[in-house]
Amino acid sequence: MKILVIDGQGGGLGRQLVAAIRKELPDAELTAVGTNSAATEAMRKAGAERAATGENAVLVACRRADAIVGPVGIVIADALLGEITPAMACAVGQSAARRILIPTNRCGSRVVGAHGGMSAMLQEVIDALRQDRE
């Protein structure tokens, strides 16, 4: 399975996602794309096999992924303090990949019903990825 993790800002969520996916699904082909170099580096250090930065990297990686994981803001133009371009949001939204979005309320949009801590949400991501493999 080809899993794409997308994150921005400092890459903290992406780092946690990459580490959890790497631990729980070690055979997955894991690519990380950051909207900036700090996010990319955080995810690379967490164990992403491949890592790239920027809009074109998002566009290309979305065409190749089986699953895309990241904060809900990756499908909202101008989210993550403007780091998500309209082209990035469109590429994620139009990808044939399954999107597994974490409902953070830090994307300039409030997701109601998002409850529980980050560790519970990370476990839900892993469970969803495992179901895709079956």
Image: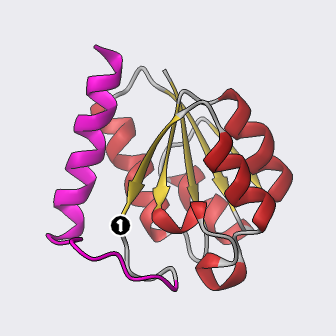
Q: In this picture, which residue range is highlighted in magenta?
A: 108-134
Image spot of residue 77 (x, y percent) = 68, 71
Image spot of residue 96 (x, y percent) = 61, 30
Residue 1 located left or right of residue 84: left
The answer to whether 40 is drawn above or below residue 82 in the figure is above
Q: What residue type is labelled 1?
A: Pro
**Residue appearing at x 77%, y 66% in the figure:** 86
Image spot of residue 92 (x, y percent) = 64, 48
Q: Is residue 54 visible in this depiction of the protein?
A: no
The answer to whether 40 is drawn above or below residue 65 in the figure is below
The answer to whether 47 is drawn above or below residue 84 in the figure is above
**Residue appearing at x 34%, y 17% in the figure:** 133
**Residue appearing at x 60%, y 68% in the figure:** 76
Question: Which quarter shows the C terminus?
Answer: top left
Which residue is outermost to the top? 134
Q: Which of 63 and 110 is in front in this view?
A: 110
Residue 9 located left or right of residue 102: right
Q: Which of 35 and 134 is in front in this view?
A: 134
Q: Name the residue under label 1.
A: 103
How many numbered badges does the structure rendering display? 1
